[in-house]
């Protein structure tokens, strides 16, 4: 869990660059990637918190196996669901408030049972351990994109 917290803290340091765009890396600004990462984390935490551990069923996913084994999400291969696409304009103040909310909500993960789960659109049901790994992979994926935007 400390790795996830460290990634969230690293992501937060990118707020100063929220307006930066580099279209050779991404069509969207750094702020979009930050907001998207926040939306994903908050929605996943809400979903796993509301799940019923008795309903968890493991099903092998080759795609999940590949991504989790490589510890990397490939760029440009998947489309995010609309519910995690930032719709409003973002600014540093809004992002800071969202980070505070996420830092409070992430504590919920410490209170859940191992069989609490999140249903990923490509990987299927992810138990708590796999959900936390997904959050880490996804956050790191967007930090890497942000770093490339900033470098360019």
Image (spheres, rainbow, N blue to C red):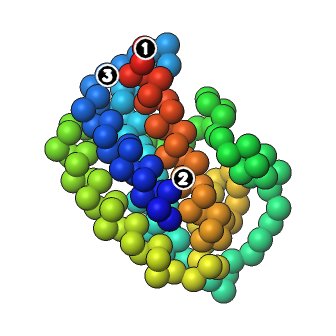
Res 104 seen here: yes
Nearest to N terminus: mark 2 or mark 3: 3
User: In the rendered view, does 94 fall on the left or right side of 118?
Assistant: left
Q: Residue at x 55, y 77 (%)?
A: 51
Residue 142 is left or right of residue 13, and the answer is right
Classify 10 Å Cα crowding around label 1: few (below 14), some (14-19), many (20 and above): few
- Mark before the other along the chain sequence, 1 or 2: 2
Is residue 146 toward the left or the right of residue 69 in the image? left
Q: In the rendering, at what x and y percent does residue 122 appear? A: 69, 51
Residue 136 - label: 2
Camera-nearest label, 2 or 3: 2
Label 3: which residue? 20
| Residue beneath the point at 61% across and 29% down | 76
Answer whether residue 89 is visible to the viewer in this image. Answer: no
Q: Label 3 to label 1, Cα distance in Å? A: 10 Å
Determine contact: label 3, label 1, CB under 8 Å: no
Vertical order, 119 against 111 (above or below): above
> Residue 149: where, in percent of width, then height?
42, 22
Nearer to the camera, 51 or 146: 146
Secondary structure under tag 2 reads helix
Q: Would you say 121 lies left or right of 86 here? A: right
Between the residue at mark 1 and the residue at mark 2, the CA separation in whole angstroms equals 24 Å
The tally of labels here is 3
Residue picked out by circle 1: 152
Q: Classify mark 3: helix, strand or loop.
A: loop
**SS for tag 1?**
loop
Q: CA distance from mark 2 to mark 3?
A: 23 Å
Crowd rating for badge 2 (residues with CA inside 10 Å; few <14, some 14–19, many 20+): many
Farthest residue in the bottom direction?
54
Quarter of the image containing the C terminus? top left
């Amino acid at each position: 869990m400390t790795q996830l917290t460290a990634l969230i803290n690293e992501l937060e340091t990118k707020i100063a660059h929220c307006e930066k765009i580099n279209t050779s890396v991404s069509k969207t600004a750094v702020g979009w990637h930050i907001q998207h990462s926040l939306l994903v984390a908050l929605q996943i935490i809400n979903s796993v918190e509301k799940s019923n551990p008795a309903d968890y069923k493991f099903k092998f996913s080759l795609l999940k196996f590949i991504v989790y084994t490589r510890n990397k999400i490939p760029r440009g291969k998947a489309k995010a669901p609309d519910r995690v696409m930032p719709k409003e304009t973002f600014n540093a103040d809004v992002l800071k408030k969202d980070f505070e909310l996420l830092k409070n909500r992430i504590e919920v993960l410490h209170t859940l049972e191992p069989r609490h789960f999140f249903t990923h659109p490509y990987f299927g049901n992810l138990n708590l351990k796999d959900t936390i790994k997904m959050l880490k992979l996804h956050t790191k994926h967007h930090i890497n994109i942000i770093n490339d935007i900033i470098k360019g």
